[in-house]
Image (tube, rainbow, N blue to C red):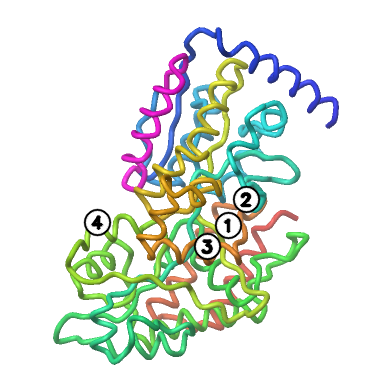
Amino acid sequence: MKNWLATSIFAIATAFAASASAQTVEIRVQYAQPGLFKETMDEITRQFMAANPNIRVNMLAPPPGYPEILAAHLRDALTGQNPDVGCHGMFNQRVLAERGLAQPLDPFIAADPNWRSYGFTEAALSLGRVGNRQVGLGFSMSMPTIYYNANLVRAAGGDPDRFPDNWDAIIDLARRMNNQAERRTGIFLSWQIVGNWMWQALVSSYGGNQLTDDERQVAFNQAPGQQAIRLLARLVNDAGMPDSNYAAASQDFFGGRLGILIDSSAQLGNIMRTVGQGFPVRTAPMPLPGGAQARLPVGGMACVMLARDAAKQQAAWRFLTFASGPQGATIMVRNTGYVPLTDIPRNTPEMLGNYYRDNPNHAVTLQQMRVARDWYAFPGANGARINDVIRDHLQTVVNRSQQPDAVLARMTTDVQALLPR
């Protein structure tokens, strides 16, 4: 390990020293979710190339989501056609590292003379580690967030300035918002988010884990998971949550027909732009019934280096640190509801300091970062299949075809059978 790192640092340091006179290098970059990131990535690319005239960025067409970009890069690796930089859902970093595709970033960090100036926090960097190696830089971080229509909260007898901080009160408020005659629904939880992110959020908020520490046994069948799946059933049975999806629920929220939408903070920019002056949109943190043990998984996107050519690796590193660093983070936050990897913009008034002051809805995500944990990726070749199994079982709770405790028992058995032996 030490010999590998020392050799890598020497080679990269030499590349840094020679970069000023280097010829133009082209790198291919690909990200997912253009609905959230196209405007952001276009602007980052424009500013990066202006600041780095010897690097040309060829931004490849973005797949619609994280599963699609992962499948594409796993497939392209077989023929050596992968881009030089890939931006993936954080939970997919493990797959890319275990397949030997994501290049370790530790030697680049050690050799970069400007590393400390980027302001990357240790907590945020930890989200890009697999084992003891840094394989990704978090480009954007999100947390589960409650969005609510202040007018509908007030009409239901609630106080928009004091949104409830516990599930019992939230469920009661949502129930009072339901009005079939006016086609109005009280609440929707986006439980279908890729990678079972919201299910992980519910379990973690009660202080639980998906697997045991040795990753050999299911752990979501313990008390926190039991409470989580029963809460999902309560949202359906007591609060009237429909068997729907984010696309339909968001349209209801935009149209003033849904009172409470629980989704990723990543949607904040889109929600604020779409609602416009239609009604006051407020945000609130997720309840943390697990007390001191409660955590919430960080969602979002991490960028990994897939390049193997030395010159392209050097150019890719410059792009990674620009996109995730202060300049890229400022662009990203202003266009979305994500949180940056670096502390510099939020502490610099002209970057994001004044922006956060003037946009309090963004502050909720920052507040919740104190309980952040990783977006868990199941080990082994069946990781993606496990996600599908969990989603399919949760669907039977939401459509009321099965009782939550029975679903949890079957889900435990099915997931246990797919874990590495």
Which of the numbered marks, if any, corresponds to residue 273? 4
Q: Position of residue 126 (x, y in %)?
A: 66, 49
Name the secondary structure under disc 3: helix
Q: Of circles 2 and 1, which is in front? A: 2
Q: Are marks 3 and 1 in contact (CB under 8 Å)?
A: no
Type of residue at label 1? Trp
**Considering depth in this image, is 220 or 336 the residue closer to the camera?**
336
Q: Nearer the viewer, mark 1 or mark 4?
A: 4
Identify the residue position indicated by label 1 in the image.
375
Q: How many residues crowd around disc 3 within 10 Å: few (fewer than 14), some, or many (20 or more)?
A: some
CA distance for labels 1 and 4: 28 Å
Instruction: Look at mark 2 in the image and give the residue it sits on.
Output: 127
Q: Nearer the viewer, residue 108 or 231?
A: 108
The residue stretch that appears in magenta: 34-57
> Element at badge 2?
loop
Q: Nearer the viewer, mark 4 or mark 3?
A: 4
Mark 2–mark 1 Cα distance, whole angstroms, equals 8 Å
Q: Earlier in the sequence, mark 4 or mark 2?
A: 2
Q: Position of residue 354 (x, y in %)?
A: 40, 54
- Main SS of the magenta part reads helix
Q: Nearer the viewer, residue 136 or 49?
A: 49
Q: Earlier in the sequence, mark 1 or mark 4?
A: 4
- Looking at the rendered image, the quarter that the C terminus falls into is bottom right
Q: Secondary structure at mark 4?
A: helix
- Is residue 266 found left or right of 320 in the rendered image? left
